[in-house]
Amino acid sequence: MVSIPDGLESWEDRNDLGKLSEAILRVMPGELESLIIEKNINGKEGDKIVCVIADGSMGWALEVAAKIGVRRAAFWPAAATSLALTFEIPKLVSDGIIDSNGRILKNQMIQLSPTIPLMNSTNFVWACVVDQATQKIIFDMLIRTRIAVKSTDWIICNSSDELEPGTFSLFPDILLVGPLLASNRLGKSIGYFWPEDSACLAWLDQQPINSVIYVAFGSFTVFDQTQFEELAMGLELTNRPCLWVVRQDIIADMDEAYPKGYKDRVHKRGLMVSWAPQQQVLSHPSIACFISHCGWNSTIEGIGNGIPFICWPYFADQFANQTYICDEWKIGLGLSKDESGIIRRGEIKDKLEHLLSDKSYKERVLNLQVKTVDGVRGGCSHNNFNNFIEWIKDN
Ligand SMILES: O=c1ccn([C@@H]2O[C@H](COP(=O)(O)OP(=O)(O)O[C@H]3O[C@H](CO)[C@@H](O)[C@H](O)[C@H]3O)[C@@H](O)[C@H]2O)c(=O)[nH]1
């Protein structure tokens, strides 16, 4: 593995997406180009770079590959529906739903096709970020992404026919190869730089089967103090064992974050860790449900282990993923905010009780688990993946 700078200093705030995106676009294309050229001029014969596979949202890397004349493939790590929405941006503009800067002109439900779930225009990927300046930066990046991804040799997506059949029939160029889960990998998962707290697995061993609420919000979500306290109190009210991932940067002041005396009150049945081995956690028999921000990886990992969801989306594609979870697959419940925009402790407790007492959520997610895992073992995802590997080898 090699790293290249992202254009920010180590102390700068990487949760500021506008600043991060600008820095990436300013610095990384040049760095990547120099890296590839250096390898291809001075590298040993077997070390030359002949193909670039890049995350589609890093469309600039695909542009660099095209410029240098290296073959390229886009990997889309999120739901295909979010890529389909990006492909449809020109139509959204011509239909008057957004303007050419991505501003939402009509607050309405839209449907890309009758077989794709309804989306609320205010939940479009770029519209969910805080301020208009950042929205514009993200929107411009998506326009570039759209062009870069559409011109690649392959677009592969971490999804499956069983999860998003409507999207794949409408956008056959997006080839599904997922869900890519740790249980299907040969070795240890790589890619995270935060140390995992594996002691939580021993703690899970001590809990009754199908009892623990697992709470994790991925790598970006941040909380304000009131919302953090309501979540803490809601979990306490359930009287159930909870494993809660509290990243060090999830809230501004971690020292003051928990309600007074909270840790002492819950210590017998609550465990807070800064980063968990999530896929191992989700496959543990003591886990009963997953309070999730609905990032796509968390979504497919929950399904891959047959765990029902309480949805707590934060931004970007997570609202569309919530729609799939709650309305399409019916394997989870959403949470309602009060008039001040806060999800209150009582709402958290009520939804958890509903989810855990109504066994139909668990039944449906177990059914979906079987169908998606089969797709990887011998279905469409399996065939696409093999063809993709052959293409790499052939050239
Ligand atoms: O304690 C933890 C918490 C998470 N994870 C892992 O971290 C990943 C989280 O991925 P995801 O659920 O997709 O969330 P984000 O990291 O927030 O992902 C970003 O990227 C996703 C894919 O493009 C988008 O769907 C999300 O909206 C976006 O926030 C998963 O593989 C988890 O297993 C851990 O290993 N330990």
Image: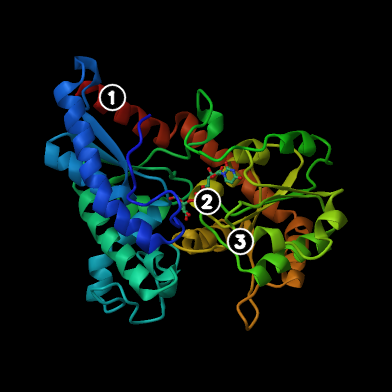
On screen, residue 175 above or below 290: above
Which is nearer the N-term, disc 2 or disc 3? 2
Q: Which label sits in the foreground, 2 or 1?
A: 2
Residue 91 location (% of width, % of height) = 24, 69
Residue 206 location (% of width, % of height) = 84, 37
Q: What residue is shown at x 40% (from left), y 70% (from top)?
A: 127
Mark 3: is the Cβ under 8 angstroms from ligand 1?
no
Q: Which label sits in the foreground, 2 or 3?
A: 3
The kind of residue on which mark 3 rests is: Ile
Question: Is residue 257 at least partly visible in the picture?
Answer: no
On screen, residue 279 above or below 148: above
- Relative to 276, 155 lies left or right: left
Which is nearer the N-term, disc 1 or disc 3? 3
Is the residue under label 3 in contact with that under label 1 (CB below 8 Å)? no
Q: Residues within 10 Å of mark 2 (few under 14, many from 20)?
A: some
Residue that carries the numbered disc 3 in the rendered image: 251
